[in-house]
Amino acid sequence: MLPVFRSLTVAVLLAMGVTLWWYPAATLVMVEPVAWGQLHEQQYAPRQRASPFLSSAVIEQSRQSRPFMPMAEFIQNQVGGAMLEVEAGEWSRDLPGSDGDRAWLAPDRVPVTDPPRGWVHLALRDGEALDFYRLQWVDPLQHLGDIPPAQAHPFRGFPLLWACMGIVLVVMLALPVRESPAQASNLARGMRAGLGLLFFFLPPTLVSLWLSQRSAPDAVYALIVIGGMLALTGLVTALIFGRQYAWLRRLMAGEGLLAHWRLAPEHWRDFVQRDMRRSRGEKLARLVMVAVMAVVVGLGFVLFAPDRGAGLVVAGVLTGMVLLLALIVLLMPLWTRRRLLQALPQVWLGLEGVCIGHQAHHWSGLGSRLESARLQRGKQGRPARIELTYSGLRGVSSGRGVYVYRDQQNVVVPVPPGKEAEAEGVIARLRAGKGK
Amino acid sequence: MVFPTASVLFRYPVAIPRLAMLSMLLFCAGTVQAQPVLSILPESTGCMAVLTSQAGGLYRGCGPHWRFRRVAGAPEALPVALTESHRSLILGTRTGLYQRPSDQTGWQRLSDQPTGALACHGAHCVVRFFGQGPRRLSDGRLSPPQVRGLPDQPLQQFVIAGDGALYGAGMGAGVLWLKPGSDTWQPVGSGLGNGNVLTLARADDGTLHAGTYGGGLYRLRPGETRWQRLSGLPAVKVTALAVSADGRRVLASVGDGVRESRDGGDNWREVPALAGIPVLSLAFDGAGRAWAGTREGRLYRQQDSDWMRVRFGADLIVHQVASVGQGGLFVLMGDRLYRRPYPGAEWQRIETPFPMTDGSAALAMDAAGRLYLGSTRQPPRRLDSRTGEWRMSASGWPEPGGVRALRTGPEGVVYGIHADTGQLHRLDPEQDRWTPVEVGEARPGHPLWDLRRLPGDHGVAWGPNDLVWQRPGEPWGHSRFAQLERGAPGLDADGVLWTRRQVTVFSLAPGENRWRDNAIRHPLYVEAVALIDGTELALTEDNRLVRLRRREDGTWVERNAYQPPGPPPYALTATGDRVYLGTVDGLHELDPVHGTWRDITPTH
């Protein structure tokens, strides 16, 4: 099975699962028992509760200016003259008692054919007895916190659906995948991650767009914005890595290939170990620079900020950032080393980039270029290596705009013993290609 | 009455919602509404007391003519319930409980709690304040609340038996009782299929009737333990109930009419005279006559087998009165127009050319003694005194459109304000033609509300943003005031005109044409009529009636003051030396010698 197929299937399954688990019912009928006696009492009983604007005395004065209405008049006034009398039946079995909480019914269970916009007052007749309710047709999106989950989210009531989706998901994750060197590369993984992001966030975003036609709460609009942005990010990521992945596949197929070397295992391990130390050293140097700047800025805030508390907060945030960077600097080389040790000990070197094991570097993209290439011969019996430096454009946004700068990357390519002459030829080709 | 909820005002600063709320309160307080009849009480004196839902809305009338009048001095609080105990009236209101012994005119406040229900039998009384349990009331003293066994739903109806047993009922509560000496409420009988009890009545023989919401009427006879639903009456809501003393006659209001049973509830028939009328209260008086009070504030009385409407409440409000000649009177009272050709004559009801049920009718009398009548939907018409027919009044009235106000202004000239445009029109007595009064910018778009004659033949008319005025012998002047207070401008004793704009007061001194921001002086005379002796009778803005004499320097001095015989608003007129004042309770004539009033209200 193709890795990209598995990634897409898993992403779509997860997206569908989350969306269906949350998807709200179309319309529900909110049913509340009405205790007219208590409502009548509340209308006229004095209250001591004050409002933010009106004193309790003013409120009481306004209440005392309401003429008294006998109970029947009060009910008529409250219901606007319209009280629907309905016979009790199967449909009313789940209604709450006169002192119960509100209930939620599916619209087709309520014997009212033309749902109005506001409340419907209903007298439920059971023989001589009458119970009173008021009903409102509501969009469950507005009341998700109040409605029992099984009613608010109807798809949760289909266990077969969830079982099927679970089985497919488990099968997808359990099936072995045979990856080619190109498919195992960081470029293929990046492309799959972008596609996964796109296909995971696209369905809920589209569903949210659909729901926004209803009386959607703010969360739906937030989901449209955030989900849409993440889906777009996934698309751009997939396009960028997909283009580089296509180059890598062509390179491994021999197109533009300058050299293809296989390294002995001990040579490969030695290279991986040294490359990790080199990479860590470079990153540590950057970390020290950032840490010094953070200390200077943090101290400045602590010492000179008018609000000392705010200064301490800034210093704390900067410290946390430096600690996080330090963790990354320590772990990333280890992660890279682990991946490289699992990869085939091979090197593909081309005019547009190089792939060392699973790790590909491409300098032919927009704004990228090869800066230098040189052969470093091994000392004390160590193998030679090619040191490449390439750069790419990076952008940093600030309050005034986007600053673009060139970021350099150093890459070390191991040269198998006996391939030094070929390596010199490769460097000459690279330099020639760079000069074009 | 609808009040804004505070929630819609939350975004605004504190002062704005407070002002908005208070403005709304003031606005609502001035709104004229129907007075639903809450209860009809047959007094032990043989008279009937009728309680409406408006503040001070307690009326009383006695046979045989049943001329109902507002009870003077009744608490100006919104009433809830009325009962009688040992010849004392007990009145429950939204702001307290009051008692008035029959031999006194003053009311004694028993509690400042809002009363929810009230019932008495002899010396035994029960009262329930809103938010509390029922309490016994004896000799003006309240016992502690009785709470054991009370249901969750409040009891709203009470009945007391002769032995002191207390019955209570309520919406969702069913019927319970408290035996004498017991402190625990217990359900009364079984088989009450509908616990939404709206009304409860007890006959002298102990039979209980419970009227329910949607379940019809139930009966429980003495010695029985199970309620019986009276199947002759459909399972509807029974909003009011009356049972005669012998228990044989039962009246039940079913929302849109009244049903009557003459055999204790077994067989029922509709009362045709009350078909379709929302009756809120029913009662039998001591002579066994039935009474009914409606949501619209009407009162009906059974006479033999017929029902007849009793003049009551809004029927007694005198909207306008006009006098002609030596004691001739026209009075617009309720929705009827009456004429009395001379003092002491019988009142004659005059058929009007249009129904006056919407309360907007207006009348005026010109200097020639011709009567004009109009309403907001009807242009002014003139009564032909010879034929008694109504004809279209003088030409020139802009049609279509009725008249918002019709008044006799300065110099006895009739003025009308057009209902649609709000423009002031003058009925030219020489040309017998309506002509618009050209007063500055007071044209369509600047409507006027009303017009009054002030002392010294001053005239003033005002609208939401305009004030026009006339001094004796001068043309009308005009000033614009944004947001004039909705009340009549007035004239003070120095002949200065005054008006209010929100919290600002403006004055216009005699001989000047510029209004000044000023501090108000009292009293202000807001309406006046001229008397034959050269004096004037004026109404003050605080509802006093004073006789004014003009000094040589043009200022006014008060000679006599008279206490009006009833509550405002007032309708004032005079002819010769006779003064007539209409109130919300009827029409009264002033005895100028003794300063007393004689009730001359038409009774039919």
Image (cartoon, rainbow, N blue to C red):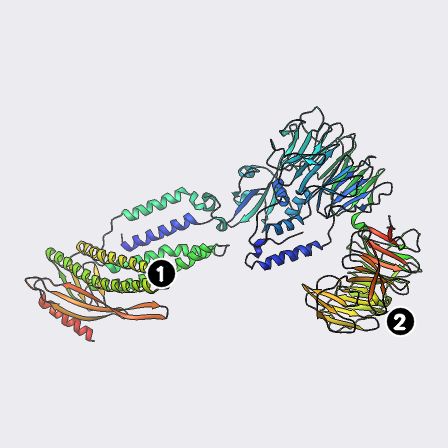
**Residue A431 percent location from the top left of the image:** 17, 73
According to the picture, the residue beneath numbered tag 1 turns out to be: A308
| Residue A289 sits above or below residue A434 on the image | above
- Mark 2 residue element: loop
Task: Inspect the image, locate mark 2, and give the three-letter code of the amino acid beneath it.
Answer: Glu
The local crowd at label 1, few if under 14, some if 14 to 19, many if 20 or more residues have their Cα within 10 Å, is few
Identify the subunit bearing mark 1: A
- The picture places residue A23, in percent across and down from the top left corner, at 44, 50
Q: Are marks 2 and 1 on the same chain?
A: no
Q: Which residue is mark 2?
A: B430
Residue A169 lies, in percent from the top left, at: 32, 47
Residue under mark 2: which chain is it in? Answer: B
Q: Nearer the viewer, residue A112 or A78?
A: A78
Seen in the image, is B442 located left or right of residue B347?
left
Tell me where residue B477 sits by quadrant.
Answer: bottom right
Q: Quadrant of residue B361?
A: bottom right
Residue extending farthest to the bottom is A436
Between B190 and B48, the one lying in front of the other is: B48
Q: Taking A390 as reference, is B475 left or right?
A: right
Q: Which mark is residue B365?
A: none
**Would you place residue B532 above or below residue A142 in this image?**
below
| Image location (x, y in percent) of residue B328 | 91, 57
**Up-down: is A270 above or below A140?**
below
Residue A117 left/right relative to B457: left
- Name the amino acid type tagged 1: Arg
Extreme left residue here?
A: A380
Q: Residues within 10 Å of mark 2 (few under 14, many from 20)?
A: few
Asked if residue A53 can be seen in this view, the reply is: yes
